[in-house]
Amino acid sequence: MNVVINGEPENINEETLFQLCKRFHDHPNFIATAVNGEFVTVKERPDCRLKEGDKIEILSPRQGG
């Protein structure tokens, strides 16, 4: 399905936000996620089913200054 991840069009096979996070990050519990502008908690990700055209934000903390 076609979605937008962090502003970039992407074709994905994952059905849930949990699956998508595992694909992009080794430690998916240490990232923040939103779908269509709504924050999605770690506990909600397995039940968050993705749909065609969803806008997904995946943010990870950075160190430095």
Image: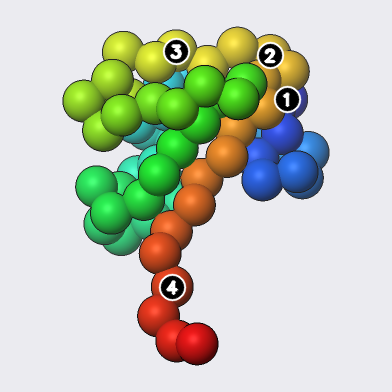
Cα–Cα span, label 2 and label 3: 10 Å
Q: Which residue is mark 3?
A: 49
Q: Residue 38: x and y, percent?
A: 52, 22
The kind of residue tagged 3 is: Arg
Q: Is residue 59 left or right of residue 29?
A: right
Q: Earlier in the sequence, mark 2 or mark 1?
A: 1
Q: How much space separates mark 2 and mark 1, taking CA atoms?
A: 5 Å
Q: Earlier in the sequence, mark 2 or mark 4?
A: 2
Circle on res. 65? none
- Label 1 close to label 3 by CB (< 8 Å): no
Question: What's under tag 4, amino acid-wise?
Answer: Arg
Q: Which mark is residue 62?
A: 4
Which one is in front, 42 or 2? 42
> Looking at the image, do the residues carrying marks 2 and 4 touch, with CB atoms under 8 Å apart?
no
Q: How far, Cα to Cα, is label 1 from label 3?
A: 14 Å
**Relative image position of residue 48 (x, y in whole percent):** 39, 15
Looking at the rendered image, the disc whose residue lies closer to the viewer, 1 or 3, is: 3
Residue at 40% x, 64% y: name it.
61
> Is 16 displayed left or right of 42 in the figure?
right
Per the model, the C-alpha gap separating discs 4 and 3 is 28 Å
- In what element is the residue under mark 3? loop
Q: Amino acid at mark 2?
A: Glu
Question: What secondary structure is found at the residue carrying circle 2?
Answer: loop
Q: Earlier in the sequence, mark 4 or mark 1?
A: 1
Amino acid on which disc 1 is placed = Asn
Q: Left or right: where does residue 58 sit relative to residue 29?
A: right
Tell us which disc is closer to us: 4 or 1.
4
Which residue is denoted by mark 1 in the rendering? 2
CA–CA distance in space, label 2 to label 4: 30 Å
Q: Residue furthest front?
A: 65
